[in-house]
Image (cartoon, helix red, strand yellow):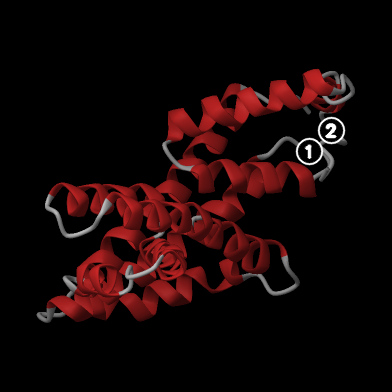
Amino acid sequence: MEYGFIDFLKLVGSLGLFLYGMKIMSESLQKLAGNKLRNILTAMTKNRVMGVLTGILITALVQSSSATTVMVVSFVNAGLLSLIQSIGVIMGANIGTTVTAWMISFFGFGKFSISALSIPLMGVALPLIFSSKSRNKSLGEFIFGFAFLFMGLDFLKASMPDLQNNPEVLLFVQNFTHMGLLSTLFFLLVGTVLTIIVQSSSATVALTLIMAVQGWIDFP
């Protein structure tokens, strides 16, 4: 069975659903937190260690290191943070962005797969979406985003070419995995380009994890 153009579109659509879910999660969490994020950021950056921890916490909450970095830059421009303080927060933001990857690994590839609960979660979120209270509405949007993220991940796994039925795909990938340093540089370039295109390192990590689990590439 050949991997055709329609199958490729399914893969792209699954990635789109994953990214959309992450976007909704990020935006709804920022709405829920409101100005609290700004208060936390200004209060918890008195030393470098606290700055790093603050960056990790905020990025884990908003699911976007870019959002944290933009917030920090605006605070530096406004004089609310010093340049030294901002370095710690940005370092923490880069660590915090790995929370998504850990969450995907635990819930998406473990024995307990949360994707099976995606539709029931949407049922829980639906009444909240139509609530007159903005906080409840944002909570409903967050649950929807969470469900979309893992639905997209599930569809991604299903859309990846089956290696048993598509040995030519495995052969193509393996041609680039046994070249030593060149292999490392090649996949580094692929990861960089893919992240630039989709504007999400978490999506790139999700694709990499799926390829590793399905045997396309090895973990090291």
Front position in the image: 52 or 17:
52
Badge 1 marks a residue whose secondary structure is loop
Q: Check disc 2 and report its element: helix, strand or loop.
A: loop
* Rendered-image quadrant of the C terminus: top right
The crowd level at tag 2 (other Cα within 10 Å; few <14, some 14-19, many 20+) is few
Q: Which residue is mark 1?
A: 162
Q: Which mark is residue 44?
A: none
Residue at numbered disc 2? 165
Give above or below for 103 relative to 206: below
Q: How many marks?
A: 2
Asked if marks 2 and 1 touch (Cβ < 8 Å), the reply is yes
Give me the residue at 76% from left, 27% from top.
Answer: 184
**Quadrant in which the N terminus is drawn:** top right
Q: Quadrant of residue 116?
A: bottom right
Q: 163 or 91: which is nearer to us?
A: 91
Residue 199 showing in the rendered view? yes
The reply, left or right, for residue 35 in relation to residue 203 is left
In percent of the image, x 67 and y 42: which residue is there? 208
Report whether 162 appears left or right of 195: right
Vertical comparison of 160 with 135: above or below: above
Please, what is the three-letter code of the amino acid marked with disc 1? Asp
> Which residue: 44% across, 75% down?
121
Does 73 appear above or below 115? above
How far apart are the two marked residues, 2 and 1, measured between alpha carbons? 5 Å
